[in-house]
Image: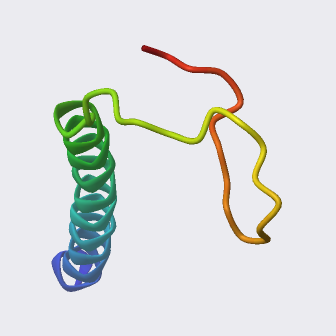
Amino acid sequence: MNIIIARPKRWIFLVVALGLSVVILANIHLVYVAFQSRPDCIDHLKVKSQQDGTYRAADSAC
């Protein structure tokens, strides 16, 4: 009788461990892709525009 009770607990543990592993690996992949796809310097507006909706960098990184 104990074997029957232990199996569902084992399955629950395995499903939770698998789900946690997927979340951790997805976050690692997200960080990896973020660092690999950093764009090079691009031109941006250096002076304040009078037109609404245009943004400029606070400080140039180039």
Residue 27 coordinates in the image, percent (x, y): 33, 49
Residue 50 coordinates in the image, percent (x, y): 82, 60
Which of the two residues, 24 or 41, is positioned nearer the viewer here?
41
Determine the residue located farthest toward the top in the rendered image: 62
Q: Quadrant of the C terminus?
A: top left
Q: Residue at x 31, y 39 (%)?
A: 31
Which of the two residues, 50 or 17, is positioned nearer the viewer here?
50
Position of 3 relative to 33 (above/below): below
Quarter assignment of residue 58: top right
Q: Is residue 52 left or right of residue 23?
A: right
Quarter assignment of residue 11: bottom left
Q: Is residue 24 left or right of residue 50?
A: left
Quarter assignment of residue 39: top left
Which of the two residues, 16 or 25, is positioned nearer the viewer here?
25
Q: How many marks?
A: 0
Describe the colour scheme in one phrase. Answer: rainbow
Residue 23 coordinates in the image, percent (x, y): 33, 59
Which of the two residues, 56 or 13, is positioned nearer the viewer here?
56
Position of 44 relative to 16 (above/below): above
Q: Quadrant of the N terminus?
A: bottom left
Position of 50 relative to 52 (above/below): above
Q: Residue at x 49, y 16 (%)?
A: 61
